[in-house]
Amino acid sequence: MHFALSDEQQMIVDTVRAFVENEIYPHEAEVERTGQVPREVGQEIADKCKELGFFAANIPTEFGGGGLNQLEFSLLERELGRASMALSVFFGRPSGILAACDGEQRERYLLPAVRGEKFDALAMTEPDAGSDVRGMKCTAKRDGDDWIIDGTKHFISHADLADFVIVFVATGEESTPRGPKKKISCFLVDRGTPGFDILPGYDSVSHRGYHNCILSFDGCRVPNSQLLGEPHRGFDLANTWLYATRLTVATMCVGRARRAMELVLPYAVERKQFGQQIGKFQGVSFKLADMITEIDAADLLTLSASWRVDQGLPANREIASAKLYASEMLARVTDEAVQIYGGMGLMSDLPLARLWRDARVERIWDGTSEIQRHIIGRELLRPLGG
């Protein structure tokens, strides 16, 4: 068993970390203050990412991407996790599901996304259907060679930047032993299509400047050529291409926690109370010991799950464990970091308050902690007939 990074993997870590520190950190305070990323700043980040050769690093080389495997991509995402998501989103990572594009779709959607000419957003969540994907009410009905989409999506991350959306909708119903379930299909829908509007979303306390949006479909007609994959097989498509996205949450949580740790360690040495460094007080040193132990544990869980994906091994439980533990770890670590800093930890002069606020959403999106626990329990009991 070998835990050291290869030279190539270490290069990924070093390069992305330097990029984050030099190209993203300097803009964070302004984005936090205004809640917006100036267009020219986002474009500059994307352009410099292309210069590095890291744009679309997650897409297979046969489509012009970087072809990183899951472990390498997790290392990249871990370093991006240190940065404001409003800014790091421009470090181009098209949705991996676009690799399912076929024929003309590759020229129209996949390849422009890989080249950074088009930006995508993934749309699944609805007001009444979050974790319950099959409960979605947004529908598409066949009309000759077209489909008519009606309904609403919300909490759609960075859709305000998107040139097109990858949207999952109900296209029928099927009988199962547990009752009727909706059939799901996936479509590629261009911004500006009649009957499709991208509206401002809600004002979130987490990840300022990284906007969520509401998508409205009202008689939106799209041709069958914009169906991604097979009709009514969108659930299988999502399970094939999207289940590892939970690793992105886990890895970014680890990166964010390490940044919090790097902020608090020097402070524990520099800050003095009662005539000595506060890090020498057991109440603080024990916090630090617990924090780094949890960070390392989350890191190893995440990298282990990534390795299993690369080996083609079953990884559903391991991915759920990584997402669950890393997101809850981040909440504990950022909270303790604020506690060690005291009142200054809540001031906008430092990024700790932002890291603390941003941590809250990680236990909700891409599957709540409760959903992850359900997945883990199910995977443990199923082999025994449970």
Image: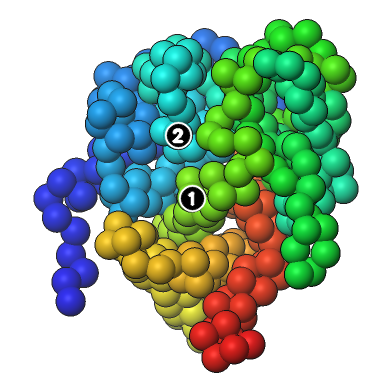
Q: Residues within 10 Å of mark 2 (few under 14, many from 20)?
A: some
Q: Is residue 41 left or right of residue 37?
A: left
**Residue on which the image places disc 1:** 240
Spatial distance from mark 2 to mark 1, Cα to Cα?
10 Å
Quarter of the image for the N terminus: give it. bottom left
Point 81% across, 51% down: residue: 135
| Residue 234 in which image quadrant | top right
Badge count: 2
Element type where label 2 sits in the image: helix
Examine the rendering and report whether any part of residue 260 can be seen: no
> Taking 252 as reference, is 211 above or below it?
above
Return the residue nearer the eye: 53 or 82: 53
Point 46% across, 28% down: residue: 101
Q: Position of residue 208 (x, y in %)?
A: 68, 36
- The reply to whether the C-beta atoms of the residues labelled 2 and 1 are less than 8 Å apart is yes
Q: Is residue 122 left or right of residue 201?
A: left
Q: Position of residue 347 (x, y in %)?
A: 68, 47
| Precedes in sequence: disc 2 or disc 1 | 2
Quarter of the image for the C terminus: give it. bottom right
Q: Residue furthest bottom?
A: 384
What kind of residue is marked 1? Thr
| Residue 265 in which image quadrant | bottom left
Q: Which circle marks residue 100 in the picture?
A: 2
What kind of residue is marked 2? Ala
Return the residue nearer the eye: 159 or 312: 312
Point 57% across, 82% down: residue: 382
Q: Position of residue 313 (x, y in %)?
A: 34, 67
Element type where label 1 sits in the image: helix
Q: Position of residue 64 (x, y in %)?
A: 28, 24
Q: Which circle marks residue 378 in the picture?
A: none
Q: Is residue 44 left or right of residue 138?
A: left
Examine the rendering and report whether any part of residue 363 can be seen: yes
